[in-house]
Amino acid sequence: MVKRGMSRRAVLAAGSTIVAWQASPLRAMLRSADAAAGPATRASIDELIARMTIEEKAGQLTLMPAAWGGGIATALNPPAGNNNYPVQIADAVAGKLTGVFNGNGARMALQMQKAVMEGSRLKIPLIFAADVIHGHRTIFPVGVGEAASFEPSLAERTARVAAFEATGAGIDWTFAPMVDIARDQRWGRTMEGAGEDVLVGRLFAAARVRGFQGRNLADDDCLMACVKHFAAYGAAEAGLDYNSVDMSIQRLEEIYLRPYQAGVDAGAASVMSSFNEINGVPSNGNHWLMTDVLRDRWGFKGFVVSDYTGDEEMIAAGFAADRRDAARLAILAGVDMSMSSGVYQEHLPALVRDGQVPLAIVDQSVRRVLAAKAQVGLFDNPFRRIDLNREAQRSRLPASLALSREAGQKSIVMLKNEGGLLPLKPGTKIALIGPFAAEGRDINGPWVVYGDNGQAIDVARGLHDAGARFTVTKGSDVEASIPGGIAKAVAAAKAADVVLLAIGESEAMSGEAKSRTEIDVPAPQQALAEAIAKTGKPVVVLLRNGRALALEGAVRDARAILVTWFLGSESGHAIADVLFGKVSPSGRLPVSFPFASGQEPYYYAHKNTGRPNGPGPLAEYKAHYQGVPNSALFPFGHGLTYGDIVYSALQVAPQMSGPMRVGATITNRGSRAAVETVQLYTHQKVGSLTRPVRELKGFQKVALAPGESKTIGFTLTPDDLKFVGADGKWRIEPGLFDLWIAPSAEAEGVHGSFTYRAA
């Protein structure tokens, strides 16, 4: 029986396996593998494929959850049907598995890889994957929070650290980045991506791919990235996870496909198919999507993996007749690897023998998977990332934690600051109230497989380390009241100078399968806020969330509001740094906060309609809900600083035929230094198809000292003005365009216009 523990003798034996591998014929045959997968590599892989049985080929296309996983990993992805670790090792040795995911670190990887390299017929190394979404041991802000930094280079740096840590634990491949555009905030997976905007989504997708994959995938601190979920998963109808997607080709091409393409163009080695269907065809059986678009049009050379049992789910969707049919449809569509369902291992051999799936198609998928293993250096050294000492040596280093703190600072968005309540003055007597004040929970955020909330810095610890004077009162639970809780909180508020109200969503309310019909602050917390407001003490709301929320009552009306998302390991320190003015808040909303949940889906780049309400009071028979404007409570791009920022002196030419330089003067009239995110928007007034009211075309972060002015310039090109026409092709049409350089998608900033004429 295989034991889960790893003795010193076993470690030494593994070392002898590494030495034996380095002298093996297969290693010699494949040692020429490099990141480019050149002719020598392809020839070597083809030679290996020729030696494989159809069953072994099906095994190379089968990925399973690790039977020996960590507690969190097992809860996220239960190893249904293969939770017997010795059996899983036997399957790996028999060639029935290409690898496993979300396993128990380097110790497990060493044991499994050793068994395969000693006992399997072909000695093809396993690949070890994991959900390293926003950090490994050091946890960074959730994706939508980090996108609030409007700093793609920051995302590249945090992904680089995540790769550094994860590869130390024997992980070769991460199921990230998630690049789905999220325009309905009821969808729980908003927290994983970069929000609602196409440009922001594209830039962060590319940055995260670069960060994970580094300079050379064969390096032992680089992870293979996986762009997901292909495609349009964020457009699930009504924000309901796994739901159908039905949309025009124009919307699909202009908005939802572009971040995936950006990730592919950045060199992503793998792509994950999505759960949803598009216009009646599940992604896992969509040849047009997986082959015509991804491979033929975009030139993607890597491999496609299904999401967790996604191929099998075509049966319940009514697209596949049974498991065999699901396997046939998926492999023919272009899904190379099956995750968790086992349908490829179970049915591909018979499908090939019966002539329903050409052997050449299976061989092509195997070739792609083996080429990826070569890219990450496994054929050169199967134990490249497996080192028991390295795992501890790379985890939670001071520099990594410092980056987590920086990322947290830059992700925080200040929505309000009436009367200059923030930053707090030294010596202020603070009442820290709310379910997220302390207790070391709900800090890291959803989709953290290997991090530990017990190691994360909560708000109370952050205030303590900043030398603050404060008391802590819970007041309520996240979704339940506490007997006497409000009374204690009110008493604490009355005894303080200011209240910090730490409220919002728990980790269990955001993420996969966490769609919400009402995206509000839960009722017990709202009741707590209303009671605190009645004390008359100034309130600073510290909002914890993984999506935009519809704020109301005392929460909406608080004098100051900070959106703190789920900030990860250094959450409390980052929040304290902003509260006390160690840094000026610089985050901007990557999602629009609506007035009410019923506005969803709401996003800034909507159409004008033929009956826009226009400025001023709400009018009858115009495009708005009863009593609610067709706008955001806090729009995309919004965020305040501790400065007083003014936009002036727009520079734009009256006509454009080629690249055009536009600009504006940005001034900080305040007494504190600030960082402003300057945003460029355009709107085509008339087109052959109607166009959104605004579209983001560029942004820049600019640091401004008190009293300082800077002229900020952008280069606008004809490509920036293109859209997909009725014929499904990209085009640019001459005409009049509005242009804004502004602090948000609904702010005026400075506004002008120009006419585009073809050169």
Image (tube, rainbow, N blue to C red):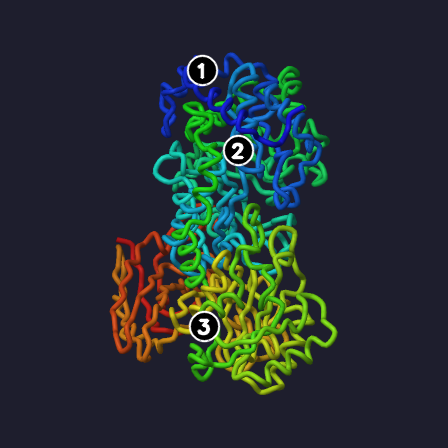
Residue lying farthest to the right in this orientation: 483
Is the residue 107 above or below the residue 632 in the image?
above
Residue sitting at x 51%, y 44%: 132
What's the amino acid at mark 2? Phe
Left or right side of 404 for 2 = right
What distance separates the C-alpha of mark 3 from that of mark 1?
A: 61 Å
Residue 190 location (% of width, % of height): 55, 56
Q: Residue at x 38, y 63 (%)?
A: 682
Sequence order check: which comes first, mark 1 or mark 2? 1
The residue that mark 2 highlights is 128
- CB contact under 8 Å: marks 3 and 2: no
Tag 1: amino acid = Leu
Tell me how far mark 1 sits from mark 2, CA to CA.
Answer: 20 Å
| Eye-nearest disc, 3 or 2 | 3
Q: Which mark is residue 26?
A: 1
Task: Determine the secondary structure under disc 3.
Answer: loop
Q: Let me know if residue 178 appears in the view.
A: no
Label of residue 467 in the image = 3
| Residue 659 placement (x, y as % from top left) | 26, 56
Q: Which of 307/380 is in front?
A: 380
